[in-house]
Amino acid sequence: MTIVLATHNKKKRAELARILAPLGHDLADVPLSDVEETGLTFEENARLKAASGCRETGLPCVGDDSGLCVDALDGAPGVFSARFVGTHGDDEANIAKLLDMLRDTPEERRTARFVCSICCVYPDGREIALRGTCEGRIAFGRVGTGGFGYDPVFLPDEAPGFTMAQLSPETKDKLSHRGKALALLAEKLMQGDTGVKVIVLPDKGAIGQAVGDLICDLVSQKQDAVLGLATGSSPVPTYQRMAARHRAGEASFQNVKTFNLDEYCDLPEEHETSYHTFMREQLFSHIDILPGNTHFLDGNCADEAAESERFSRAIGAAGGIDLQLLGIGRNGHIGFNEPGPSFTGAAYRTALTESTIEANSPNFVGSDIPMPHYAMTMGVGQILQARQIVLIATGEEKAKAVKAMLEGEITPRCPASILQEHPDVTVYLDPAAAALLADTPRTSL
Ligand code: F6R
């Protein structure tokens, strides 16, 4: 893969090239515009540089921001490290100012750390953000001629008796803040494009626009695309976007077939709270899809096995699902596959859990039929057969389930966790749903 590095610093470029080359990644030599480092944190600045480089080149772009945080100076010079004296990159003057400020600071209070934030932004909006630190102390004078920046006055704990400027490039890579952040990046890049892609957008509207456009683009490339669709609040903005693109003459669904994930049992399909009605009101009546091309499970079927068989055959006859849209329950369910002892396969009748009944009951306020406690749902195995899966989750009430899905073990106790095994899953989150993720790729598009 070709990666762009958003820096004009030749020494940083050399460090990155040394670490990425063995992984088969080339650094593209593309001139980039200067980016003003207006962020208040290293991570913000790294992201600004990477996002700008990615926008300019259309290639994945790595940006970094690093600096020195001195405890006796309350973390200064921090993000201002390279411009401590005002002008950018005057290493000599920056060091002189630092030594002067620490003139009366005794050795035990000269603790400090180098921090490096690295951010890789991809053209599709994915983002990897990582951080490396190197603990040490500030020396009383300059020693050594290697490295750059504050290296001659930084004594790393991991190389007792030496300043950073005295270390060989190989030793420096192993213990430096940038070396550590890059090693984490290398690990991520080695995982390549497999695994779940996570995109965090500012709000529901932005997600609806992105996913709606993705579906419309798929449909314009493959006019007879087969879509797996979900109900609930999560896909509503997506359906609004699809309808808007259709109204604008930009998308036709005439040859598209759809299969809905689930339908309640013991509820007439024409009832105002049924998923048949939901889909008609939210999407189908606003686009040019043919009613005969929309498929649902029959929640009132007399023979569950025969209904499951019919539905599987219909999906097979349509050529399989190209894109499956999903929401996620607060308990980690997908479709109505509730947490249980094992993953399910084809469609079946399921009992809804307390959590789901509580979450969906508001839709039945004022209804003459109370919220059903059973539903017919596509099974997990069937969902996994879709060629591409897109899951949307928004709001803090989804944050725990999202964390379990993406970072937890793969277990039927969190049915969505199985998506970690699918080769093409993209999860769209708002910041609240992403809040508990340890290592969130955050998008800035
Ligand atoms: C809907 C479905 C469910 C929902 C999930 C989230 O067809 O199968 O899995 O996607 O319960 O619902 P919302 O989006 O309302 O939070």
Image: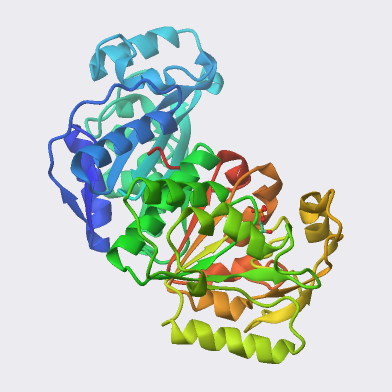
- Which percent across, then down, holds residue 65? 35, 32
Relative side of 30 to 174, left or right: left
Relative side of 417 to 273, left or right: left
- Which percent across, then down, holds residue 441? 46, 47
- Taking the image as drawn, is residue 119 in sight? yes
- What color scheme is it? rainbow
Height in image: 211 above or below 389? above
Height in image: 439 above or below 76? below
- Which percent across, then down, holds residue 88? 25, 17
Q: Which residue is drawn at the image coordinates 61% and 90% (left, top)? A: 309
Image quadrant where residue 66 sits: top left
- Which percent across, then down, holds residue 401? 67, 56
Q: Which residue is drawn at the image coordinates 76% and 69% (left, top)? A: 268
Image quadrant holding the C terminus, namely top left
Height in image: 340 above or below 20? below
Relative side of 2 to 318, left or right: left
Report ligand 1 position as a quadrant.
bottom right
In this view, the residue in front, 43 or 148, is 43
Q: Which residue is drawn at the image coordinates 60% and 54% (left, top)? A: 281
